[in-house]
Amino acid sequence: MTWDELLANPLYQYFFVLLFAVFGLLFVVANVAIVGKLLFRPSNPEPSKLTTYECGEPTIGTGWVRFDIRFYTVALLFIIFDVEIVFLFPWAAVYAKLGGAAFGKMLIFVVVLLVGFINAWKKGDLDWVTSMAAQDRKHRVQ
């Protein structure tokens, strides 16, 4: 069947009208459900409802707790190296088509990553628990 024959068929034309009506109806129902819940829900704020609730346990202290910087450092290092390593997968998938020049460029890329990793390791950013002697050595060097 050609495109012109399909367009000449009245049932085919009504299919698009039906499809448009279904999507329009779904759009209206979804908006009424979302907006209706926001407009017509009961609003009864009480002090007990406004308290912090964490895993069924009452909170102890304030929510503004200072975290150790090691959490952030490890997370950032993980994200940096994880994202960079992801670039290796597409390269490995098409390695046979790329040839030796692509291997050299990827080798440079991996060496740069390795230098960054060694730098983070030497600075002690990967050490979760450091001894007091290591901290004293670090402060004497600075």
Image: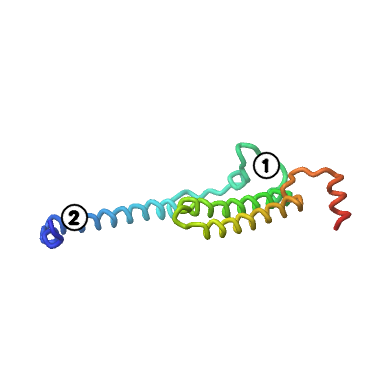
**x and y percent of residue 5 in the render?**
11, 60
**x and y percent of residue 71 in the render?**
69, 48
Q: Can residue 66 be seen in this view?
A: no
Residue count near mark 2 (Cα–Cα under 10 Å), binned few <14, some 14–19, many ≥20: few
Numbered tag placed on residue 59 in the rendering: 1
**In terms of depth relative to the viewer, which is nearer, 125 or 30?**
125
Q: Which residue lies furthest to the bottom in this view?
A: 4
Q: Can residue 113 be seen in this view?
A: yes
Q: Name the residue under label 2.
A: 15
The kind of residue on which mark 1 rests is: Thr
Dividing the picture into quadrants, the one containing residue 56 is: top right
Dividing the picture into quadrants, the one containing residue 57 is: top right
In the displayed structure image, the side of residue 5 where residue 87 appears, left or right:
right
Residue at image position (57%, 58%) is 104
Q: Are marks 1 and 2 in contact (CB under 8 Å)?
A: no
In the displayed structure image, the side of residue 92 where residue 8 appears, left or right:
left
Residue at image position (76%, 50%) is 124
Q: Which residue lies furthest to the top in this view?
A: 56
**What whole-number distance in Å separates the C-alpha atoms at marks 1 and 2?**
57 Å
Secondary structure under the numbered disc 1 in the rendered image? loop
**Relative vertical location of residue 127 with respect to residue 97 in this rendering, above or below:** above
Residue at image position (48%, 53%) is 95
In the displayed structure image, the side of residue 140 where residue 50 appears, left or right:
left
